[in-house]
Image: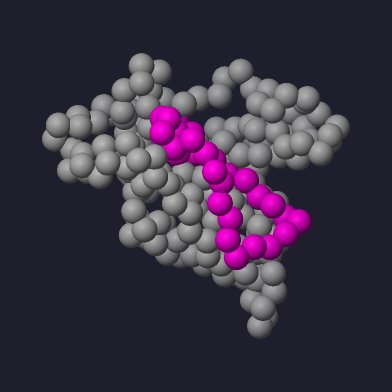
Amino acid sequence: MTYKKIDLKTWNRKEHFEGFMESGTSFSLTTKLDVTLFYKRIKEKKLKFYPTFIHQVTQVVNEFDCFKIGFNENQELVLWDHVEANYTINSKVSDNFISVWTPWHKEVSSFQELYLETLNQHETSKKMAPQVDMPLNLFVISMLPWISFDGFNLNINNNETFLAPIITAGKMIEQQDKKLLPVAIQVHHATSDGYHVALLVDKLQTQFNQF
């Protein structure tokens, strides 16, 4: 969990950061990604969709500095060298979700093995976040496989120090022989703008196409 401290005095986003932190402004953008080829290749490789989605999204998010900004244990503004996915799984003993994380691995098959270990270990937990080793360098992923959507927004207290992106996928739909996945991306405006989210969406689509 390494990082570089951000010097607000010299940071070119100083005014934007301070202004949007004061106003507590976040925004959410929802789009539909074409996962036709991605889904096909996942099946061909005998992988599971959700851990593969987590793996690929984590890889792409880490290509953008603006999505790796957060606060360390001393409440200092930092740029993490790498961020991990804090994702949700469904409880086997209730209708609640469970919040967990799995260290990212370059090989998707290896990551899936680690994901399955995490799932088996915690899916019967009665705690919201059962892991004691949850790091600070996280962003959030969840999936709502029961419903598709055209818009999704989480109302959180944006005046605090939570700067991590929140990425939420919905139920896949079929449209004109294509498989489309609704994806909502919520970010804190202090660290990123619509331009950055658009770049992220474009890169995600490319990543899925080339999987």
Spot the residue most to the front. Answer: 23
Q: Main secondary structure of the magenta part?
A: loop
Q: Residue at x 86, y 32 (%)?
A: 93
Expressed as whole percent of the image width and height from the top left, the position of residue 40 reads 66, 67
The reply, left or right, for residue 156 in relation to residue 127 is left
Above/below status of 166 relative to 79:
below
Q: Residue at x 41, y 30 (%)?
A: 161
Q: Residue at x 61, y 39 (%)?
A: 87
The range drawn in magenta is 137-164
The reply, left or right, for residue 163 in relation to residue 150 is left
The reply, left or right, for residue 169 in relation to residue 72 is right
Image quarter of the C terminus: bottom right
**Magenta highlight on residue 157:** yes
Image quarter of the N terminus: top left
Expressed as whole percent of the image width and height from the top left, the position of residue 4 reads 28, 28
**Magenta highlight on residue 82:** no
Nearer to the camera, 120 or 79: 79
Expressed as whole percent of the image width and height from the top left, the position of residue 31 reads 53, 65
